[in-house]
Amino acid sequence: MALNQGMLAPGSNLDLLKGLRELHEATGGGSSQVTVVVIDGPVDFTHRVFVGADLRTALGANIMSAEAGNSMAEHGTHVASILFGQPGTEVQGICPGVRGVIIPVYDSVARSAPQLEVARAIELAIEEGADIINFSGGQYSDTGVADQWLSEAVARCAEAGVLLIAAAGNDGCECLHVPAAASTALAVGAINSLGEPMDFSNWGHGYSCNGITAPGENILGAVPGGGVSRLSGTSFATPMVTGVAALLLSQSRELVPAVAASPLMIREVMLRTTSPCGKTDATICQRLLSGTIDVEGAVAAMSEATVIGPSGVSPAGGCGCGSSPQNANAESGVSASVRPSMADAPDGQNMVYALGNLSYDFGTEARRDSFKQLMPPVEINGEVVPPNPYDARQLVAYLGDNTSEARALIWTLNIELTPVYALEPTGAFGADLYGRLVEILAAEILGEGEEDHVQRVSIPGRLTGNTVRLFSGQVVPVLQLENPRGMYGWKHNALIAQAAEAVSGRTSATADLLTIQNNLRAFLDRVYYDLRNLGVLSSDRAINFAATNAFQAAMVFSEALGGGMQLETIETEMSPFARADADAWDVKMKFFDPENTRRARRVYRFTIDVSELMPVTLGQVRSWTTAV
């Protein structure tokens, strides 16, 4: 994902929008009860404009240098200062009183970030208790649809009631960027001092439904190492909109806390109250997206009782996009602000419980060649050939006799062949953990039909904030492994055979063992492929542990599986009944009869506490039937 910036007009940013300074003063620069997360480059927290700001890097985020001359830090620092710059400094931020969290994602070498890393950052922002996410970046997309990782992360924002505000892009064409093009996001284009669309600002049909324009020319911001500069681009129009949204949310919570608007309601209000295009040129109007941000109009709308209600507000423009079901669900549910933030939570909230495949990497050619020199030659079809470190069978044989050499590898957890974490065993169990990794890798390379074949692995660990650059150039976060508990090699074939046998013993003689096996296999595959996740969010850790704990699940699901039913949905919600110190989630699984869809569904619910690295189940599994 590339940055969205452009470059080079006097005055404070607060004076670029009519009514903004008045809103800023009325709210005192924003409430500390509002959390704005900025996903961008690293930020120079030592710059004097941030002195006194409630601003930090997210726990578990990649730690990156923000020294002067780092272009990624220049971008991140500039964007952050537009929002959080303190009063009386060179850059007076739009919402300096809110709680700010920074999640750096841009690689200083590539000057971009993969969609996977942006998705990872969005999920981390949700875990931080974000109300609003500012992403001044994006990637061109022919269809306006992001890859699965990013699409699911954006959907999670809406489900959690989090407002994602993203730059529309600087290609100067009728084209879309992701994630800005997502129907639940708020896309931001740039206008100049005359209110006209800037030449580089993107437009497109999708943006006419979810897009808004704001000043993006010569926006004042801080520079790493000291000083200020003025830059142009949709990157800098985006925090202008984010700042206004944060102030509107602050005002709502301060004035009417009992019925305060959700961040997604703020989005709808801002879309509904945009200033319409006053030009006769249809092309210019199209480039203004749904219209230009109107601070005074939004403030007036927020004061109406009909706005601060249970239902959403349709966006302006008559394009028929309206609020998606995700929006409606999020607005009627619990807002993200009621969830505890990582900053206020007990230590260890940077935990991960992920599912994937184990692999390895050398990092550099030199390290790869060192293994090639140390490994013995192999005989293939009677011919002795040099060793190949990329052949997992040869490497496993070498590590079996030289276990300590496992420390020289970069062990990775992959999902769909994509490395998502670098695994770093540590502590008193470090040697045992390296040995366990070698054992799992040896089981992974067995034939798929063999009983001891490991199809995937569950990994519990903690994000360290450190990263590792792989041989391919990809940068992945380091996941620290502390204890063998919870590290399971998923012997798919053995698990299904044993669980199916246990289920069969509890069902009637008419139960089809093959059907039970197929249903169990579908259950495990469904969790891994359809609900794949990074294992960071508490709800995701609960789902992943539910899959890992399939033996218990199989025993409980005997009635459904024995009756030929299949898994329909898996849902999670915070458990209302749990210990005071627990991070407990109810996992609900619904089964249906594929041969008789009119038959009542069977629902099973069990509670999982993910407050420790090794999740645990609480209480007994409950079940009931439901018509839908």
Image (cartoon, rainbow, N blue to C red):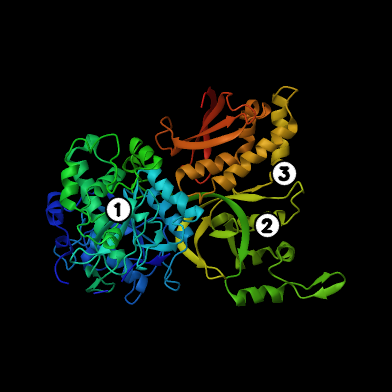
Rendered view: 76 above or below 513: below
Judging from the image, what secondary structure is the residue with disc 1 in? strand
Label 3 or label 2, whichever lies nearer to me, is 3
**Left or right of 623 in this view: 222:** left
**Alpha carbons under labels 3 and 1: distance apart:** 46 Å
Q: Is residue 423 visible?
A: no
> Quadrant of residue 625 in the image?
top right
Please name the residue shown 35% across and 73% down the image.
71
Judging from the image, what secondary structure is the residue with disc 2 in? helix
Decide which of tag 3 and tag 1 comes sooner along the chain.
1
Query: Which numbered dot is residue 493?
Result: 3
Query: Which numbered dot is residue 6?
Result: none
How far across and down, in percent of the image, does residue 133 sit?
33, 53
Decide which of tag 2 and tag 1 comes sooner along the chain.
1
How far across and down, in percent of the image, does residue 200 sit?
32, 69
Judging from the image, what secondary structure is the residue with disc 3 in? helix
Q: Amino acid at mark 1?
A: Val
In this figure, which residue is indicated by the disc labeled 1? Answer: 36
How far across and down, in percent of the image, does residue 264 sit?
31, 44
How far across and down, in percent of the image, does residue 98 sit?
24, 52
In this figure, which residue is indicated by the disc labeled 2? Answer: 441
Decide which of tag 3 and tag 2 comes sooner along the chain.
2
**Left or right of 416 in this view: 384:** right
Q: Quadrant of the N terminus?
A: bottom left
Q: Nearer the viewer, residue 125 or 244?
A: 244
Label 2 or label 1, whichever lies nearer to me, is 1
Q: Amino acid at mark 2?
A: Leu
CA neighbours of label 2 inside 10 A, class few (<14), some (14 to 19), many (20+): many
Farthest right residue?
382
Q: Amino acid at mark 3?
A: Asn
**Alpha carbons under labels 3 and 2: distance apart:** 16 Å
